[in-house]
Image: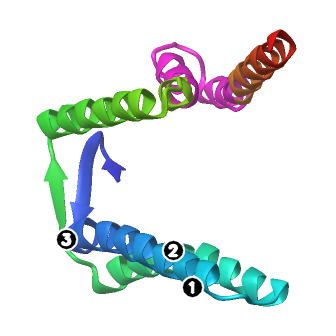
Amino acid sequence: MLSGGQLQYSLIDLIGYPAVFLMTLFLTALFYKYLASNKIPKLKQFIVFGIIAATPIALFIGVIYLDDWLGAPAIHFGPAAKGAAIFISLLMFIFMAIWSKSWMSIILPIVLFLPEVLIGFTDFQENTKLMLSVTIVPLCMGIYLLSVLRMEKKKEKSS
């Protein structure tokens, strides 16, 4: 979380979020293995997929409420840690782009976060900044998705 420009996390957050992520991966792999090895009716498959979808949501909400309920002390990260987190995130997005051979993992964060950052540097009133961010981000996403759609149609026509 950002609080006063500083990153701060409680010990429950630092342990809980990765634990929920790993439990979700394990649960998903377990359910897919179960679905692949057993012939089950469609209704039961939908129930299994519902469990796969609802479990991480419930666990993340549980971590948030547990943190609020226990009131664990927060660990504050300064500007150096914030910079390191941004750098590691950038490396991960670049790695995912190389691995998937797609620009989506680079363009998506740029489209989502860059307009917010650029709008933050302007001298507009808060209402104007809010309206610009609500308008520009979906507009940029739409432009990007339309351009990808056009490129895919061109690939289909040429092949």
The answer to whether residue 121 is magenta is yes
Between the residue at mark 3 and the residue at mark 2, the CA separation in whole angstroms equals 26 Å
Disc 3 residue type (three-letter): Leu
Where is residue 41 shown, x and y percent of the image? 81, 89
Task: Using the rendered image of the protein, determine whether residue 60 is visible from the camera's viewpoint.
Answer: no
Where is residue 97 shown, x and y percent of the image? 44, 29
Q: Residue at x 36, y 27 (%)?
A: 94
Counting residues from the start of the chain, the first of labels 3 and 1 encountered is 3
Residue 72, picture quadrant? bottom left
Q: Residue at x 29, y 85 (%)?
A: 70
Magenta-tinted stretch? 111-137
Counting residues from the start of the chain, the first of labels 3 and 2 encountered is 3
The image shows residue 117, relative to residue 123, as above or below, that is below
The label shown at residue 34 is 1
Residue 35, picture quadrant? bottom right
Q: Which residue is mark 2?
A: 28
Disc 2 residue type (three-letter): Thr
Q: Which residue is mark 3?
A: 11
The image shows residue 127, relative to residue 8, as above or below, that is above
Q: Quadrant of the C terminus?
A: top right
Between the residue at mark 3 and the residue at mark 1, the CA separation in whole angstroms equals 34 Å
Secondary element at tag 2: helix
Secondary element at tag 1: helix
